[in-house]
Amino acid sequence: MEKVTMDTLINYAKRYGFVYQGSEIYGGLANTWDYGPLGSELKKNIKDLFWKRFVQESPYNVGLDSSILLNPKAWQASGHIDSFNDPLIDCKACNSRHRADHLIEAHDDQVLADAMDKAEMETYIEQNNVKCPSCGAQKFTAIRQFNLMFKTSQGVVDDKSQDIYLRPETAQGIFLNFKNIERTARLKLPFGIAQIGKSFRNEITPGNFIFRTREFEQMELEFFCKPGTEMEWFDYWKKESKQFLLDLNLADENLKLADHDESQLSHYSNATTDIEYRYPWGFDELWGIASRTDYDLGRHQEVSEESLEYHDQETNERYLPYVVEPSLGVERLFLSILHEGYTEETLENGETRVNMKFHPALAPYKVAVLPLIKKRHREGTLELYKRLAKHFSVVYDEAGKIGKRYRRQDAIGTPYAVTMDDQTLEDGTYTLREKDSMEQVRLTEAELIATITKNITF
Ligand code: GAP
């Protein structure tokens, strides 16, 4: 694949209304992004396809939409209050702020800073003369552990208000509802609960456009199974997750499975693999898949003093299920999809076109409806718009020459364009143009609906 720079993608995203800087008219708010008409459609399609694959089509999984605010005891139990920290270090020369583990890994990518404690990181930075990436100096403060949760308060009167947190992952809302869902959906192990929603982390070094932000969306699945079977399910969900990405047309060569070794594993995990994508700066985490044992249910059972055990009716055993968790960021997948699809092509006539090669199911608009001549075909095309919009998302464009209108749709990844012309008035057929091949065929309205419907199905 031809290399696409981050600047190209950012400019593209802004120019066509995918992603704007947040609060732009006030000079922006660092690292916040707003999703415009095309971006909000693409995001919605990403979430819908995740839901379709992992809930609708899964024989095992159901869905949940839990609240962002949880009882603070939940974060005490999950370990987020005590240990959801990143190592913060400041440069004494230029006052820039960094994550110590990132500084070390940027200095030597063979070193696993994740596995080091605070003192080991400080010693490494000193002994290896790690430099500040902003100014080149070698003068750093001591490392401080910085909690990433956003704190706020609930209640209107100051002295009666309670400190609460914006969730840093959607997973805990799932664990809190494990018994509710098992009972009310009458589920037997193994089964999974999926959730899509906003998460918030006060990241020390957000950046790389929408890759690392403080407000983002996660698509998470907590899959509950009998202890001892978790490795089977870990492999199963790794395969399913990778297949989902391949089916969305991410190229195999741009995906890499990175297994965590012993020293990188969280204390509650007995296996973790990241699916990495080749971003413009290199391979980086897209989707984390972790076998989390019974840690979360065990901690919530202990702190809430409510039994979260599963009763196996067949064997009459009672136990805490083990959990396998695939956890994917919506915006990271969004960025991967933009990067993968962005293509510049030279046509036979020497003209260049941007062809955004989205999977048709992801495309913000499935079809553009275009009057060949505005004066003569406007009314009929607008009528067609209304009828097609009952089936899929449609955009109408009457501005400029037909060739230019096709180029714009190519650039935003609209797989089909339907043009109305004089022949339509005679025999009721339209021209259907397919984006990648640029081939055109004449079809009746029923035929074009059938063709488009078939090809946009995921
Ligand atoms: N419940 C497990 C969990 O949250 P994580 O590895 O911290 O695990 C899972 O996050 C996924 O969420 C990541 O693989 C990434 O796709 C996304 N993610 C995490 N932090 C993010 C951030 N600051 N900005 C955007 N996406 C983020």
Image (cartoon, rainbow, N blue to C red):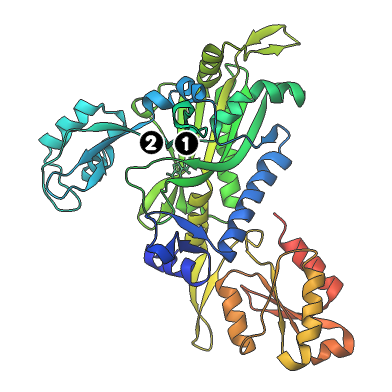
- Expressed as whole percent of the image width and height from the top left, the position of residue 86 reads 32, 34
Q: Can residue 248 be seen from the camera position used here?
A: no
Q: Which residue is mark 2?
A: 148
Please give left or right for residue 295 compared with residue 319 in the image.
Answer: left
Above or below 443: residue 318? above
Please give left or right for residue 254 compared with residue 378 in the image.
Answer: left
For image coordinates 19% across by 26% down, the residue present is: 119
| CB of mark 2 near ligand 1 (< 8 Å) | no
Kindly indicate whether the residue at mark 1 contacts the one at mark 2 (C-beta within 8 angstroms): yes
134 and 348: which is toward the camera? 134
- Expressed as whole percent of the image width and height from the top left, the position of residue 278 reads 42, 53
240 and 76: which is toward the camera? 76
Label whose residue precedes the other's in the sequence (2 or 1): 2
Please give left or right for residue 237 compared with residue 56 in the image.
Answer: left
- Expressed as whole percent of the image width and height from the top left, the position of residue 222 reads 59, 30
Instruction: Characterize the local packing of mark 1: few (<14), some (14-19) or many (20 or more) Cα atoms within 10 angstroms.
Output: many
For image coordinates 47% across by 53% down, the residue present is: 253
Quarter of the rendering containing residue 158: top left
Q: Can residue 223 be seen from the camera position used here?
A: yes
For image coordinates 49% across by 55% down, the residue present is: 336
- Expressed as whole percent of the image width and height from the top left, the position of residue 155 reads 52, 32
- Callout 1: helix, strand or loop? loop
Which disc number belongs to residue 168? 1
| CB of mark 1 near ligand 1 (< 8 Å) | yes
